[in-house]
Amino acid sequence: MSAPVFVWLILIPLLAAPLVYLGGRLADRTSHWPVAQALALAALLVTWLPFARTVGEIGASGRMGITLGSVSLCFDGISLLLSAVALGLGSMVVLFSGPYLSGQIGQEKYYAMLTAMIGVMVGLGCACDLFNLWIWFEAMAITSYLLVAFYRDLPESLEAGVKYLVQSATGSVLVVLGISLVLAQTGTLNLAEIRAAIRALNQPSPLLLAAGGLFIIGFGVKAALVPLHTWLPDAHSQAPSGISAMLSGVVIEAGLIAMLRALSALADVTLMWGPLLMGFGAVNMLVGNLMAFRQTQIKRLLAYSSLTHVGYMLVGLGVAVYAGQLDGAQGGFFHLFNHGMMKGLAFLAAGALLYALHLAAGEHTPLTISDLAGASRKYPLIALTFALAVFALGGIPPLSGFMSKWQIIVSGFETRNLVVVGLVVFAALNSVFSLAYYAPLVNVLYRWQPSPVVSRGRTAPLSLQLPLIGLAILILVAGLWPALANPLTSPAGTALLAAFGR
């Protein structure tokens, strides 16, 4: 039996990862060229070929699947969206990381783990039974942990890595407990069969309700639900900037998708999953904004703002689950897609400035707001792309962030439910509030007098700036022509509603 083409989206990065490591390891002794980076970039570029074919096939069929023994993989609109974000941002990060990691020890491990993590996230998006969903989730945690703790000689980096590992492991244990409860009650772990078994029970099940709670907490650690987010600011700020972009732009979204997959199997247990998602969304928006507002380090500020943007996704997806609103599902997934681009660009632009102002001089010093004073005069392109990213995150029209937030807000009004309408008004006010910490960043960048740090800063290589240009163009295009994202967001929204029986 020939494998569906989507399987190669998983296999190519996973099979390439050990080759990236070996090639980089051997080249350290014989060559000064970034062989590991070149191999990783080549593997991801090759992976775009089956992705292009998969887009055509999923458009015709809506869903593809394969079963090998006890392993079942199903590719639907949600899988397609996650694959696009992981591959797109991952390719930009590999390109960015060449000059950023220049001279660092262990680059072959970095590129190998990054390549493997991308394949694992695609696999997570394709899991259609709880056990294999957990396996992919664990593999994502392991590969991302090694990348968070890449600077192993720095105590702060190791502390961030340990905190991330401990909290991820705790979440994984809770997920396993939830899986055990589901298996005990239904006798199966296949998502579709679980739904059928629950309908056959035809009575409330406290154990299945408890399993849903365990899934929210366990997967919610990785999805950065408040108050399960405490690993996030340390991991984002201490990891290399490319990994910060991946953590914020893809990994937490993959955790959110894993949570949605698990809850979809329990859709008939209670009608409260939608309101619960919206409630977490409201808390995330408020806490993320309040915590970001008081930060002086750029990467910690961006990390806390990710909580807010997860909140917008939760509101849109919660509206969809509660009211069966396709617009809400599309808006939530459109914001997931936009957040990958916006936050990826923000972290990479901040990383480019961090490299020019500190790392190139051998200083592992955090990038602070005061460091950015007058940076636009010396680094005009980096400053412009950083400004575009934060304005898009703040929801300034006509950038992409505004368009996805607007779709979420409109979907809330379409429910004609006063509580939901109040929630989306609250979301809109939080978007305005976020400008209180985004706008000062741009103001500092375009000050007339450069700071001493900027004055003695080094040159930023062109290869460091090329990914910034690409992501900035995507943000502008998605904002001006948001319908171009429909081939990704519409199938994802339809798949979500079908999974929850809406």
Image: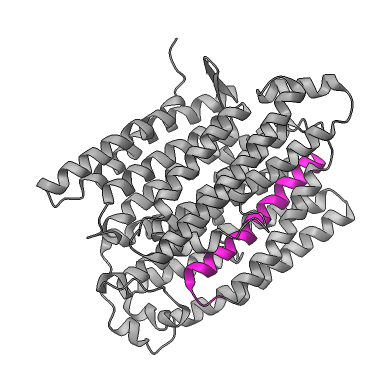
In the figure, 377 relative to 81: above or below? below
Which image quarter: residue 23? top left
Left or right: residue 319 compared with residue 339? right
Give the x, y percent position of residue 352.
Answer: 35, 66
Q: Quadrant of the N terminus?
A: top left
The answer to whether residue 490 of the structure is visible from this angle is: no
Give the x, y percent position of residue 117.
Answer: 43, 41
| Residue nearer the viewer, 237 or 319 | 237
Identify which residue is drawn at 59% across, 36% down: 78
- Magenta part of the chain: 295-324
Identify which residue is drawn at 39% across, 39% down: 116
Identify which residue is drawn at 46% across, 65% down: 237
Q: Is residue 313 magenta?
A: yes
User: From this viewpoint, which residue is outermost toward the bottom?
Assistant: 449
Which image quarter: residue 39? top left
What secondary structure do most residues of the magenta stretch adopt? helix
Left or right: residue 26 compared with residue 372? left
Q: Is residue 146 magenta?
A: no
| Residue nearer the viewer, 227 or 115 | 227
Left or right: residue 278 compared with residue 151? right
The answer to whether residue 35 of the structure is visible from this angle is: yes
| Residue nearer the viewer, 10 or 450 | 10
Give the x, y percent position of residue 341.
Answer: 49, 54
Q: Quadrant of the C terminus?
A: top right
In the figure, 456 relative to 56: above or below? below
Left or right: residue 454 compared with residue 122? left
Give the x, y percent position of residue 334.
Answer: 61, 48
In the figure, 360 relative to 409: above or below? below
Which image quarter: residue 27? top left
